[in-house]
Amino acid sequence: MPNRWLNDIVWDDHGLVPVIAQDAATGDVLMFAFMNREALALTAERGEAVYWSRSRRKLWHKGEESGHTQKVLEIRTDCDNDVVLLKIEQTGGIACHTGRKSCFFQRLGESGQWEAADPVLKDPKEIYG
């Protein structure tokens, strides 16, 4: 598939687009990240999520260290083409580096403090060594 469709994406000043990874079966939002043009092209080509790591300043194939890859079932954009939504199958059921299903595991409690709302499914030390 020619990559002309990438020209329709509205990239920010750094050449990035925000990306939401959503569990295709449950609708749960699992994580948020960024992609550059190459990452989005590779994601479409491979059928697995590849992101741009802003902290490491390099491409990051989700699961390259943990084994928790994301099989991409569908790629969508919002109405302005400035946000990408990936509908995925999460390998191992863990998307977060904390060992949880979702990166969005914290909720604001009645005390006004953030509290963990979801359990750790696997100790990160077991995942990353």
Image (cartoon, rainbow, N blue to C red):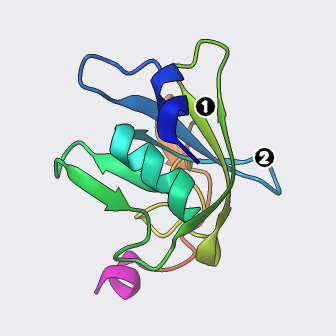
Q: Amino acid at mark 2?
A: Gly
User: What residue do we see at 35% from left, 45% from top?
Assistant: 38
Q: Which mark is residue 27?
A: 2
Q: Is residue 43 magenta?
A: no
Magenta extent: 123-129
Residue 2 is left or right of residue 25, and the answer is left
Pick whichever, 56 or 35, lies toward us: 35
Q: Residue furthest top?
A: 80
Q: Quadrant of residue 14?
A: top left
Residue identified by numbered label 1:
110
Number of on-image labels: 2
Q: Secondary structure at mark 1?
A: loop
Crowding at mark 1 (Cα within 10 Å: few <14, some 14-19, many 20+)? few
Q: Secondary structure at mark 2?
A: loop
Magenta region, mostly helix, strand or loop?
Answer: helix
Pick whichever, 122 or 81, lies toward us: 81
Chain-order first, disc 2 or disc 1: 2
Q: Amino acid at mark 1?
A: Glu
Residue 11 in the image: state x and y as whole percent.
Answer: 38, 21
Instruction: Judge whether 4 appears above or below 9 on screen.
Output: below
Q: CA distance from mark 2 to mark 1?
A: 26 Å
User: What residue do we see at 56% from left, 33% from top?
Assistant: 84
Q: Is residue 125 magenta?
A: yes
Q: Nearer the viewer, mark 2 or mark 1?
A: 2
Residue 5 is left or right of residue 97, and the answer is right
Instruction: Judge whether 120 appears above or below 26 on screen.
Output: below
